[in-house]
Amino acid sequence: MVPASAPALAPAPAPTPAKHGGLRATLFINGVQALETTAIAAVGNNLITYLVNDMHYSLSKSANIVTNFVATTFLLSILGGFLSDSYLGSFLTILIFGLIELIGYIVIAVEAHVPSLKPEACDVRGSVVCEEAKGVEAVLLYVGLYTIAVGSGCLKPNIIAYGGDQLSCEGEANGRRAKYFNMAYLSFCVGEVIALTLLIWIQTRFGMDVGFGVSAGLMLFALLILTSATPFYLNRPPQGSIFTHILQILVAVHKKKLEHASNQKMLSELSENTSRRGPERQSLSYPDQFRYLEQGAMVEEESREVEQLKLVIRVMPIFGCTIVTNCILAQLQTFSVEQASSMESRVAGFQVPAASVQAIPYVIMVGVVPLYVTVFVPLLRRMTGKESGISQLQRIGIGLFVSTLSMVTAAVVESKRKAVAPQKLSILWIAPQFIIFGFSEMFTAVGLLEFFYSQSVAGMQSFLTALTYCSYSFGFFLSSALVSIVNLVTKTRNQQGWLSHNNLNEDHLDLFYWLLSTVSFLNFFNYIFWSRWFKYHPSQSQG
């Protein structure tokens, strides 16, 4: 642990904007993000098909394996953000964990290719009970998947934060940064489109082993691009462990050594003292929330650490409200793919792989995001006076409401699909729920990333950006828990739970979707309360 006075917290030499950082550097970073997204999306979004058909796991068990894998990936973003801010810096963190992710792809590609490392071929939808993966087969599967999870999870928040860092020395940084976050999301969408079309087609046509191998190749290419642009990057030094600082403040507050610690005049004097240490160590003026924590600044003679603690507490309710939306995303990557598998997949003479329906919203977003940035943002800017058109919290709120509509649509379509079974609906029927959620994601994800980054103080950019991905994690874990709870509660002596069958025609997925719709709608009103309670930092942007 690094004490508050450690040399590691000293300010770095002033960067040279003409040589380091800027939009040129963000182009390379966005390229890395697009390639890494393509690699892992091709694995995660079609993983349930591989687990059912090749590893012979049941549908519900496969869905939980997928959600747990994705949830763990996003949860580990907290570790990546912490290591970057505290010890390694963004560049080294991206490089190290990018290599770890590459190793994971190689492991699952080898297992998928070697017949002796997986169960014998078997028709899981036939009358014969297929033997599921176990022993060495299962161990290799989990080792490969969770190596990918460690690498990708620790890498993701640092790519986003590293891009934001490149613009910190430019004029009109807030406006450029808002545009960058939209372009970063566009890079993500491009990666998803390539993964869910070309790479899924490769997996379907040439086998999962070839598909996993292509993911490995893309990850290697991403690392080559990252290192090739090293001279252009603006690198900020790590600031020391934020958890050490926060613990020091909590201890100081608990001791209550000074009776007048909340005196704003004394805090101003303290701010003048800390300002002599350079811009990276300056304290920010306090919002009028959690004032009792300021006595910790007087005891430890540090106001920046108090601000870090207050910031974490203030953003937690906003973070919590986005978890339900990401629980909905989990359904679109698991059960909705199985929905597509039970529909007529031939469209205009072309066979559409079930997993590729997930590309629909991203294809649309590739066109919508540039339109939003170039047309709607300037229009809204003239109306509201805000640099990004609407505030970050308003953008998040719009996304949360739209996600509810996605689940309502999914429930209606599933009811229709079951009503006409055994006849098959066209796979195009499932498109609306993905399209609607795509708009939800554009508002929620980008708004949340920009919100966390813009409200962060020095030494917390990667950590707070990681909270966006942590929300995905909790959403997928919540999905797994809900599936298990719903199956348990709805199970009777004569009937299995809503989602316990391997046949969607016998399950009650429509009722599960209606349940999620209700939860999401209630969560929207919960968000309204907390967004009105939240106070933007006086010295930070509201978007």
Image (cartoon, grey):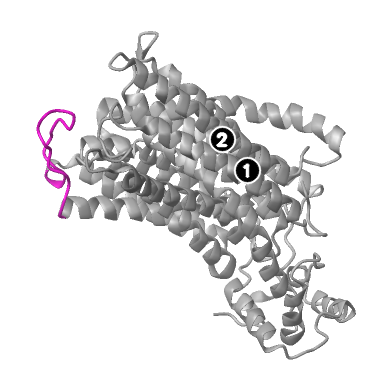
Q: Does residue 58 lie above or below 415 as drawn?
A: below
Residue 229 image point, x, y percent = 57, 49
Residue 386 image point, x, y percent = 82, 41
Is residue 121 within the magenta segment? yes
Asked where in the image residue 123 lies, by quadrant, the reply is top left
Between 44 and 183, which is closer to the camera in this rendering?
Answer: 44
Tell me if mark 1 has few (under 14), some (14-19) or many (20+) residues whose alpha carbon lies within 10 angstroms of its own.
many
**Which range of residues does the magenta coloring cover?**
116-135
Which residue in the structure is indicated by mark 1? 524
Badge 1 vs badge 2, beta-carbon distance below 8 Å: yes
Q: Is residue 444 visible?
A: yes
Q: Residue furthest front?
A: 493
Asked where in the image residue 204 lies, by quadrant, the reply is top left
Q: Which residue sits at x=53%, y=46%?
A: 324
Q: Distance between the residues labelled 1 and 2?
A: 9 Å
Q: What secondary structure is found at the residue carrying circle 2?
A: helix
Amino acid type assigned to the residue bearing label 2 in the image: Thr
Residue 51 image point, x, y percent = 26, 40
Q: Which residue sits at x=61%, y=33%?
A: 402
Q: Which of marks 1 and 2 is nearer the N terminus?
A: 2
Q: Which residue sits at x=54%, y=80%?
A: 1
Predominant SS along the magenta part: loop
Amino acid type assigned to the residue bearing label 1 in the image: Phe
Which residue in the structure is indicated by mark 2? 404
Q: Which residue lies furthest to the bottom in this view?
A: 257
The reply, left or right, for residue 254 in relation to residue 475 is right
Q: Can residue 152 be seen in this view?
A: no
Q: What secondary structure is found at the residue carrying circle 1?
A: helix
What is the count of numbered marks? 2
